[in-house]
Amino acid sequence: MLMVLRLKYEIGKEKTAVHSRHPGGDSTIMKNILLLIKNNPWMMCGGAEVFVKEISKRLSKKYKVFVVCEGTTTGSEIIDNVHVNTYKTSNIPKIRALESTYKLYKTAKSIITKYNIDVINSHIEFPTGYIGCILGEQYNIMSVLSIHGAYGSAYNSSRHNFIYRYFIRKCIKKSKRIHTVSNYSKSILTHSFDGIKNKIFVVSPGVDEKTFDSKKYNKKRKEYSIICVSSFHKLFTQKRQDLLLFAAKKLIKKYPKLSITFIGNGDATQLKKLSEKLNLTKNLVFLGKLKSHSDVAKKLSETKIFAFPTLFESFGMVSLEAMSTGTVPVVPKIPPFDEYMTDKKEGIFVELSVEGFYEGIDYLFSNEKILLELSKNAILKSNQYKWQRIVRKYENMLFSCRSLK
């Protein structure tokens, strides 16, 4: 309760103050950008964290970028013009969320009072999005809210209570621009909220051209090899690696040398038990979370097929990364995969079922020429999503925000 009162006091105090550091000025000039995100982008590898890390590195060539996040600076790259500002929180579950919100506010506020910040871009809706909106109002700075996750499914689920929904609606209403990562995500947002259609921008994630380079690694791929890069945290609720195991049970009869590599963070105990039950342990490898994106890229490049059984995605970045290494994706017939992939041209669309993944994988293994053709097409398509192109779209979005009066 004390933490809540302190935060309310700080916000109320700032509302009564007059801040004239940001009178508008020349809307074509942008020098300092403030990015708010909960987790350290150099320590985590989620979609939002990767986006912030990669966009920061490229924006730093033209602007001064300030990143505020929870944790420590340990592991952060030292990049000219990128300033990572962290804060620590306790491990007490009941107060951690409030403590993190309060310290996020104080840390971001200290940067704003020292530097002439032109735009605040908050990644993830709460608490960063809410704090970004508050600071934007207090200091007359344009605020952009970035929504990376499969928002519609999460928002409409029962696990998000009315308090969470209240804050999300406030964030979206107060933000001058809403950034999301796919047209699919945009359609969900415009359906869920009134009056935001004209302020939503779609800027997808990009592919790191140095890390996910098809020419960088050994071109020899293991025969009848499949890889699945997906978190085990959301097994059954979003990710369905279990379907791939049941499909493998059928595939192994036709392809005895079949091998499947699982990469992802979280507890894979349930999948391992299932693999034992299906007598697949000799054909499966569970690697857990790898140390770097380079390690993931290397494993992708050694494999022929990327299988991704998932119920929903906001973008499905790992599929595009697989394409960049020439590994052919087999994915469910759902959006947003159709935004960057065409069935039987750069990948294979299947029903989200055991039979669907069996048929899709079998089709590729039994048609080597088609597999090679799709691999080449996948690489060409992924070239359209290099970070050099993405950062230009991102800049245009920020400039459009600055031009608002």
Image (cartoon, helix red, strand yellow):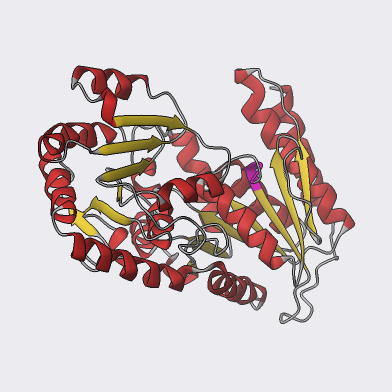
Which residue shows up at 26% across the image and 68% down it?
373
Report the span colored magenta: 37-41
Q: Indicate the quadrant containing the N terminus: top left, top right, bottom left or bottom right.
A: top right
Tell which of 205 and 301 is nearer to you. Answer: 301
- 14 or 255: nearer the viewer: 255
Task: Report the label total.
Answer: 0
Secondary structure mainly formed by the magenta segment: strand
Q: Relative to residue 264, is residue 308 drawn left or right?
A: left
Determine whether 32 is above or below 248 in the image: below
Q: Residue 380 appears in which quarter of the rendering?
A: bottom left
- Please tell me in which quadrant of the rendered image residue 390 appears: bottom right
Query: In the picture provided, is 274 more to the left or to the right than 86?
Result: left
Q: Is residue 120 visible?
A: no
Residue 231 figure quarter: top left
Q: Position of residue 24 (x, y in %)?
A: 76, 74
Q: Is 326 located above or below residue 263 in the figure?
A: below
Residue pictured at 72% horizontal, 40% vertical: 75
Residue at point 49% right, 56% down?
217
Residue 354 shows in this picture: yes
Please provide percent x and percent y for residue 193.
40, 56
Find residue 176 and report its horizontal and vertical position in percent.
58, 65
Where is residue 109? Give x, y as percent. Answer: 80, 48
Please identify the quadrant where the C terminus is shown.
Answer: bottom right
Q: Is residue 308 magenta?
A: no
Between residues 201 and 307, which one lies in front from this camera angle?
A: 307
The residue drawn where x is 77% and y is 36% is: 9
Question: Is residue 183 toward the left or the right of residue 33 in the image?
Answer: left
